[in-house]
Image: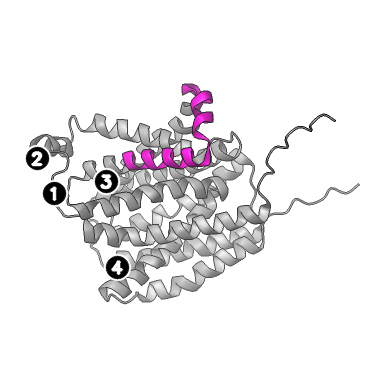
Amino acid sequence: MAAGKQKAPAPPSAEKINSRVWFYSLLLTLQYGAQPLISKRFTSREVIVTSSVLTCEIAKIICALIFMARDGSLKKVYREWTLVGALTASGLPAAIYALQNSLLQISYKNLDSLTFSMLNQTKIIFTALFTYLILRQKQSIQQIGALVLLIMAAVLLSFGEGSKKGTSSGSSDQILFRGIIPVLVASVLSGLASSLCQWASQVKKHSSYLMTVEMSVVGSLCLLASTSKSPDGEAIRIHGFFYGWTLMTWIPVMSNALGGILVGLVTSYAGGVKKGFVIVSALLVTAMLQFVFEGKPPSLYCLLALPLVASSISIYQKYPYRVKKKEA
């Protein structure tokens, strides 16, 4: 009797995928929340920012390649990888993110922290919009309400942070054209890039690890190009690449690198909209960690935001959009 064909491994069940989503989301929330404290504690003021960012990008590439070798996808990627496919899936989002970061830097210098933080939260709305336009992924009425609750929580957290900082003193035209408009355009670009990443991973089946490698390579090349004229580039040429580094500096760098890989996994499994829930939840984690390790009690705004975030997450998960059956 002829031996039967070997069956292909069954795809993971919906329950298994859901458990992965929660696991990766929880890890990313903790990483996002702890990163500001880790960076503040283990990175000295002398460390050149470009050197830490570039090292983080390289660390992301190495970690992603290790994970790909571990799950057996590295050989397949090596055989099937094409430059056109990489540029389509990762090149465009990487370029959009680079432009977004530049706009955010311009805006931050011309707006007070409170206005900047509040306007920056609109990226949650644009992510949901582009997810619908690109992936035709609809939101239920309850999920739209959950997004509104999430934005309200983000605004409250922005109040708590921004109330401690000064206000902008620029002219009205400067505030509008070099402050408000850049941050709104950056929010649109953030939503677009996040949706494109989700499209590449869910529709084109581009590995999240591979996207991390490709986007980190693009980001590293952009950083290297910027060092030719930037102040950081001049500082590196004078003092050396690892100026101000200690063994402890590697802790926030590696933490940030693993966070970058988790962002890819969360986007791949859960989508860009749910990543927005992670980011806002991480703000609460940061506030709690500051209380535990630095003795800074959470602000009233933080305490008010906590039930809003919890409610929005619960509602968004409980009431997904369901396709209505057409009548015969």
Do the residues under discs 1 and 2 have CB atoms within 8 angstroms? yes
Q: SS at mark 1?
A: loop
Find residue 34 and report its image quarter: bottom left
Q: Quadrant of the N terminus?
A: top right
Give the CA separation, mark 1 to mark 3: 36 Å
What secondary structure prevails in the magenta region?
helix
Task: Say if mark 3 contacts mark 4, CB within 8 Å.
Answer: no
* Position in image of residue 80 (x %, y %): 53, 25
Q: Amino acid at mark 1?
A: Gly
Q: State the residue position of label 2.
A: 239
Note whether 236 is above or below 121 in the view shown.
above
Of the residues tagged 4 and 1, which is closer to the observer? 1
Disc 1 crowd, CA 10 A, few/some/many (<14, 14-19, 20+): some
On the image, numbered disc 1 is attached to which residue? 244
Q: CA distance from mark 4 to mark 2?
A: 37 Å
Residue 174's tag is: 3
Residue hosting label 4: 163
Three-letter code, disc 2: His
